[in-house]
Amino acid sequence: MSIRLYALDGCPWCEKAADALDTAGVEYETEWVDALHSDRNEVKRVSGQRGVPVIVDEERGVTMAESANIVEYVEKSLA
């Protein structure tokens, strides 16, 4: 899968990013992260920070955080 979404269960911003991907019909894999920021080493490794949501589009070489940025990227580049 070339699109990965790092998300926290129950996070409204993560749900917003997932909804944008779903609406655009994009296939993606969700990587569920730990609630503790200190345990989000994988998110830190791929994005340089520990916050979620984070999207990784391997095919286009894009890694991005912040739900508003992700929604805009999905609508303009993936829809």
Image (cartoon, rainbow, N blue to C red):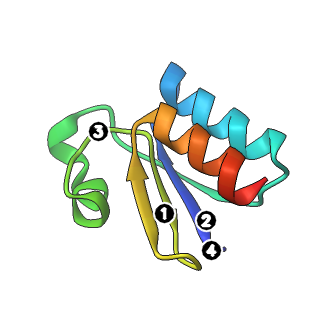
Residue displayed at 50% across by 26% down: 13
Residue highlighted by disc 1: 56
The residues tagged by marks 3 and 2 sit, at their Cα atoms, a distance apart of: 18 Å
Residue highlighted by disc 4: 2
Task: Count residues near mark 1 (Cα–Cα under 10 Å), then give few for <14, some for 14-19, many for 20+.
Answer: many
Q: Amino acid at mark 4?
A: Ser
Q: Earlier in the sequence, mark 3 or mark 2?
A: 2
Can you give x and y, in whole percent of width and height, for residue 49 in the image?
A: 20, 49
Residue highlighted by disc 3: 51
Q: Earlier in the sequence, mark 1 or mark 2?
A: 2
- The local secondary structure at tag 3 comes to loop
Q: Amino acid at mark 1?
A: Val
Mark 2 in CB contact with mark 4 (< 8 angstroms): yes
Residue 3 numbered mark, or none? 2
Task: Count residues near mark 4 (Cα–Cα under 10 Å), then give few for <14, some for 14-19, many for 20+.
Answer: few
> Taking 44 as reference, is 16 above or below it?
above
Q: Nearer the viewer, residue 60 or 50?
A: 60
Single out the residue that lies furthest toward the left.
38
The residues tagged by marks 2 and 4 sit, at their Cα atoms, a distance apart of: 4 Å
The residues tagged by marks 3 and 4 sit, at their Cα atoms, a distance apart of: 21 Å
